[in-house]
Image (tube, rainbow, N blue to C red):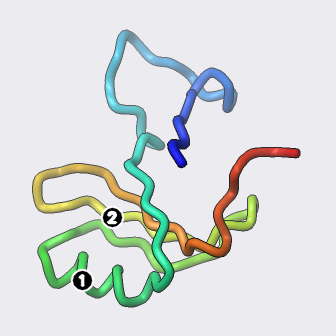
């Protein structure tokens, strides 16, 4: 599944021109968040958030990889696939 974030559709400001938005992450679906979070931390990831359940139902954490890419990992059985 490819899920694209659209700031204007979410009611967020666009800013000036194309830049990474603070909510723009590469999302990955994984079965075990704790294992993946530990692997990311051991590999040099930083800005790791705690694993938490979001208001839309996903269990998720965010991180930044050693090269600065913004990553998000969601537990596969909690994926939000859009409103009904």
In which quadrant of the rendered view does residue 65 lie? bottom left
User: Where in the figure is residue 38, as x and y percent of width and height?
Assistant: 29, 87
- Spatial CA distance of label 2 from label 1 is 11 Å
Whether residue 68 is situated above or below residue 21 in the rendered picture: below
Which residue is disc 1 drawn over? 39
In which quadrant of the rendered view does residue 56 lie? bottom right
Q: Tell me which residue sits at (47%, 79%) in the image.
A: 50
Furthest residue toward front? 1
Residue 19 located left or right of residue 27: left
Residue 65 vs residue 81, the one in the foreground? 81
| Disc ID at residue 63 | 2
Within 10 Å of the Cα at label 1, are there few (<14), some (14-19), or many (20+) other Cα atoms?
few
Furthest residue toward top? 17
Q: Quadrant of the C terminus?
A: top right
Residue 10 vs residue 26, the one in the foreground? 26
User: Where in the figure is residue 64, as x and y percent of width and height?
Assistant: 26, 59
Whether residue 14 is situated above or below residue 49 in the rendered picture: above
In which quadrant of the rendered view does residue 46 lie? bottom left
| Disc ID at residue 66 | none
Q: Are the residues at dot 2 and dot 1 in contact (C-beta closer than 8 Å)?
A: no
Q: Tell me which residue sits at (36%, 10%) in the image.
A: 17
- Of callouts 2 and 1, which one flags the residue occurring earlier in the amino acid sequence? 1
Whether residue 23 is situated above or below residue 48 in the rendered picture: above
User: Where in the figure is residue 19, as x and y percent of width and height?
Assistant: 32, 23
Q: Tell me which residue sits at (64%, 63%) in the image.
A: 79
Within 10 Å of the Cα at label 2, are there few (<14), some (14-19), or many (20+) other Cα atoms?
many
Residue 34 located left or right of residue 68: right
Query: Element at badge 1?
Result: helix
Query: Element at badge 2?
Result: strand
Q: Nearer the viewer, mark 2 or mark 1?
A: 1
User: Where in the figure is residue 49, as x and y percent of width and height?
Assistant: 42, 72
């Amino acid at each position: 599944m490819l899920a694209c974030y659209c700031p204007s559709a979410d009611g967020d400001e666009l800013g000036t021109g194309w830049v990474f938005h603070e909510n723009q992450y590469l999302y990955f679906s994984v079965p075990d968040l704790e294992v993946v979070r530990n692997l990311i931390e051991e590999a040099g990831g930083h800005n790791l958030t705690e694993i938490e359940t979001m208001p839309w139902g996903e269990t998720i954490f965010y991180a930044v990889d050693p090269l600065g890419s913004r990553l998000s990992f969601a537990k596969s059985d909690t994926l939000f696939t859009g409103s009904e």
